[in-house]
Image: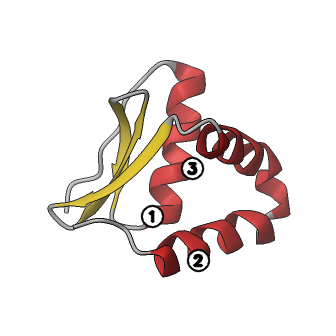
Amino acid sequence: MRHSHYQVALLHQALQEDKSNLATWRWYNGLVDSQRLALRFTHDQWVVAIDGSDYACAECLYAAVRWAHIMTRSGGYITFAA
């Protein structure tokens, strides 16, 4: 299942509204603009991939993006069991 434009629009809105997470928004926007970030919905979870490698997943799209941002800075990978 591919993410819909509506779901991505909701993510954009959530990231913009969370002023305390401006760094996450800038990070996300830069990767989207350069077409390095991919989102997919698998097994009831959103997976964030950067340059073809999975970085994080979560049931909530916004949480998956936030965790991917954290993981790229820490060099780790995190998953949330359903």
Residue 66's disc is 3
Q: Quadrant of residue 34?
A: top right
Percent of width and height locating residue 81: 21, 55
Disc 2 target residue: 10
Disc 1 target residue: 61
Q: Are marks 2 and 1 in contact (CB under 8 Å)?
A: yes
2 or 3: tag closer to the N-terminus:
2
Percent of width and height locating residue 44: 20, 67
Which colour assignment does the render follow? secondary structure
1 or 3: tag closer to the N-terminus:
1
Q: CA distance from mark 2 to mark 3?
A: 14 Å
Q: Secondary structure at mark 1?
A: helix
Q: Residue at x 58, y 38 (%)?
A: 69
Percent of width and height locating residue 1: 21, 67
Q: CA distance from mark 2 to mark 1?
A: 9 Å
Q: Amino acid at mark 2?
A: Leu
- In this rendering, position of residue 24 left or right of residue 50: right
